[in-house]
Image (cartoon, rainbow, N blue to C red):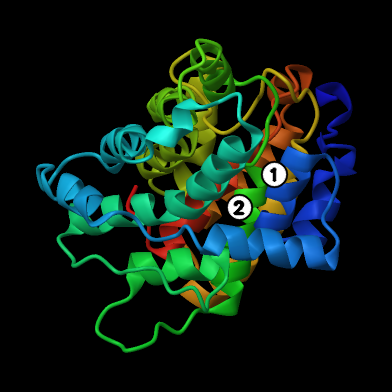
Amino acid sequence: DGDKGILRYRGYPIEQLAEKSTYLEVAYLLIHGELPTKSQYERWTNDIIMHTLIHENIKKFVDGFHYDAHPMGMLISAVGALSTFYTDAKHISDPESRRRQVFRLVGKMPTLAAFAFRHSVGRPYVYPDNDLSYAGNFLNMLFKMTELKYKVDPVLEHALDVLFILHADHEQNCSTSAMRGVGSSQVDPFSATAAAAAALYGPLHGGANEAVLLMLDEIGSKNNVPAFIKSVKEGNGRLMGFGHRVYKNYDPRAKVIKKLADEVFEVTGRNPKLDIALELERIALEDEYFVKRRHYPIVDFYSGLSYQAMGFPV
């Protein structure tokens, strides 16, 4: 209910899930309709962990990309390629086959994303460490250098897990529509997921947080915020990260992520763009022009700042 600023997953408020659940619990909830019991959660987590490794030929496939290929382009291709490795995925009417593909997709997606990132920065690939949590293992595959065992920072681990939860489901958006449209042809789920990832690649969908960072760069300093706001009101440029087709109130995910960003900055150091962002938010929430149009901050306004502070390139 965007007018009231409410987002629920299967009846659970997003704020409660972000505070009390893990991403894998939320993934179980979205698929099965209810949160898992302790034994269900242990079995579910174990089934996913068993599928974090990818076929060595997929590693060679990623190796074939140019050094400056965009990670999203690599990810789309690699996810689509999974359908050629797991030919049983086309048996979509078989419940057991469908379950297997769920485990494979949830398990392998962080590995594929991390391999795309490592290739783009010219570092050797890091294999999954199944002793770590889902988010902790992703950080390990992204950022491990020469140490024998990657030491996961619990604050960043928690932040990434919450970011995954906040982005796990958001109604009938562009990538969800792409997934369902392509899936309705009864293709295998890897191909449908590649289509959804391709939709997410578009700057009007997945690129919103990147646009916020570019806008903050363009503003340059806190002192330039009033002039920027004035130019937006005059119709020159847009205020990125504000205003949503669904939320005509404060995006509930933005409240969670703003608090999370502070925790991340405690560990990584304060992102210098934060002062500009806070000043933008302060003015926009007080200025009649934006208040009348119900332009409130959305999740993307703070997520980009958090990802950048963690070490993700824009």
Q: Relative to residue 149, is residue 184 drawn left or right?
A: right
Amino acid tagged 2:
Leu
Find residue 248 and report its horizontal and vertical position in percent. 78, 23
Q: Are marks 1 and 2 in contact (CB under 8 Å)?
A: no
The residue that disc 1 covers is 254
Between 245 and 171, the one lying in front of the other is 171
Q: Quadrant of the N terminus?
A: top right
Residue in the picture at 55% in, 25% down: 92
Please tell me whether residue 18 is drawn above or below residue 29 in the rendered image.
below
Characterize the local packing of mark 1: few (<14), some (14-19) or many (20 or more) Cα atoms within 10 angstroms: many
The residue that disc 2 covers is 163
Q: Relative to residue 37, is residue 269 drawn left or right?
A: left
Q: Name the quadrant containing residue 202.
A: top left
Residue in the picture at 56% in, 12% down: 184
Characterize the local packing of mark 2: few (<14), some (14-19) or many (20 or more) Cα atoms within 10 angstroms: many
Find residue 143 and report its horizontal and vertical position in percent. 34, 70
Residue in the picture at 25% in, 59% down: 118
Residue 163 shows in the view: yes
Q: Secondary structure at mark 2?
A: helix
Between 55 and 175, the one lying in front of the other is 55
Please tell me whether residue 262 is drawn above or below residue 220 in the rendered image.
below
Find residue 40 and report its horizontal and vertical position in percent. 78, 60
